[in-house]
Image: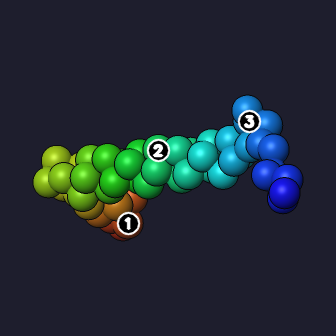
């Protein structure tokens, strides 16, 4: 008769935790990308850069 392997209750938990953290990070990156690529943010950053580069004599 062969002995079956015994598993602890938390076997594989680290892998699941890494997977959930990776999914959460990817979701946050997607949301931030959508916010930053919005028209209002792009226009504001463009105006800020143009003012910073404007040379007054």
Whether residue 56 is visible here, answered yes or no, is: no
The residue indicated by pointer 1 is 53
The residue indicated by pointer 2 is 24
The residue indicated by pointer 3 is 10
Looking at the picture, tell me which residue is in the foreground, 22 or 17: 17
Task: Residue at 79%, 52% (x, y): give it.
Answer: 4
Task: Residue at 81%, 51% (x, y): give it.
Answer: 5
Give the crowd class for mark 3: few <14, some 14-19, many >=20 residues within 10 Å.
few
The answer to whether 50 is drawn above or below residue 14 in the figure is: below
**Nearer to us: label 3 or label 2:** 3
Task: Residue at 77%, 42% (x, y): give it.
Answer: 7
- How many numbered discs sit on the rendered protein? 3
3D distance between C-alphas at marks 1 and 2: 38 Å
3D distance between C-alphas at marks 3 and 2: 21 Å
Looking at the picture, tell me which residue is in the foreground, 28 or 46: 28
- Look at the image and tell me in which quarter the N terminus lies: bottom right
Q: Earlier in the sequence, mark 3 or mark 1?
A: 3
- Look at the image and tell me in which quarter the C terminus lies: bottom left
Image quadrant assignment for residue 8: top right
**Nearer to us: label 3 or label 1:** 3
**Nearer to us: label 1 or label 2:** 2
Check disc 2 and report its element: helix, strand or loop. Answer: helix
The answer to whether 13 is drawn above or below residue 39 in the figure is: above
3D distance between C-alphas at marks 3 and 1: 57 Å
Residue 19's spot in the image, x, y percent? 56, 51
Looking at the picture, tell me which residue is in the foreground, 33 or 2: 2
């Amino acid at each position: 008769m062969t002995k079956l392997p015994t598993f602890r209750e938390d076997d594989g938990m680290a892998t699941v935790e890494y997977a959930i953290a990776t999914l959460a990070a990817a979701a946050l990156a997607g949301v931030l990308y959508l916010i930053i690529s919005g028209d209002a943010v792009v226009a504001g950053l463009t105006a800020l850069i143009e003012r910073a580069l404007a040379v007054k004599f």
